[in-house]
Amino acid sequence: MTDEKEMKERILKRSDELFRQFGFSKITMEEIAANLGISKKTLYKHFSNKDHILKEIISEHKCEIQTFIDNLVNDNTLQFIDKLEKLMDFLTHHAPIVDGPMLQDLIKNHPELWNDIKEFRKTKSNYQFSRLLKDGMDSGFFRNDINQDFIVVAYMSAVHGLINPETLSNMPYSMDQIHKQLSKLLLEGILSDSGREKYRQLKIKNENKGDSTL
């Protein structure tokens, strides 16, 4: 990694931490430079303003999420049901592009960026989740009397409806509890008899290995 690229990554990483801790609006370019121990001139050499930094942070997170999901779906070493569980876990528990004060700040003061994030989550996750559902139906894991498009819309609406600060603040449940309940509701309703047995055997196998993902 070149010195220029390393410096840019340092700026993005520290800015992301500061924005999440205090909120985007409360942090200045001067404070970012001071936290990094660099001059404002060096900071402005890489980023024209604070909005530039924020957009770059969001772009990097989106790229990381897209790469993770694409690699998971295309991983031929994993069984279908493993992919589905890992994707649902990622969508509900491990893929917050922004959180904390930064999230509240975006929703209140930068609705255009927040809407862009929501659209990205919806478009990317819906497409890959639909692919996995089709694979599940083709392989006999899921019942063939359900409407795939409806399941995708219903589950994703539940995920994106619950995983937001307004809803979470009014619910006495942790993110992990929400994920487990959503996964259980989905799989209990659409697994075929043979798929249910395969899923049960896989859970036993993973529990014996000490894997608590399922």
Image: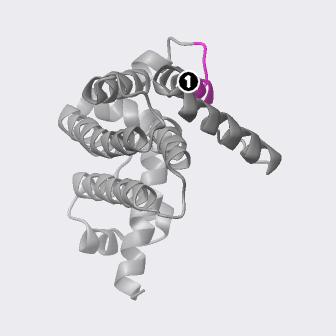
Q: How many marks?
A: 1
Residue 110 placement, left or right of 209? left
Say if the magenta span includes residue 80: no
Can you say which quadrant of the picture contains the C terminus?
top right
Vertically, is 71 above or below 205? below
Q: Position of residue 121 (x, y in %)?
A: 31, 40
- Name the residue nearer the viewer: 144 or 86: 144
Tell me where the magenta segment starts and ends, as one range: 172-181
Say if the magenta span includes residue 176: yes
Q: Secondary structure at mark 1?
A: helix
Q: Position of residue 203 (x, y in %)?
A: 70, 39
Q: Residue at (22%, 40%) from the top-left corner?
A: 113
Q: Residue at (28%, 59%) from the top-left corner?
A: 56
Q: Amino acid at mark 1?
A: Ile
Q: Position of residue 186 (x, y in %)?
A: 48, 24
Magenta region's main secondary structure?
helix
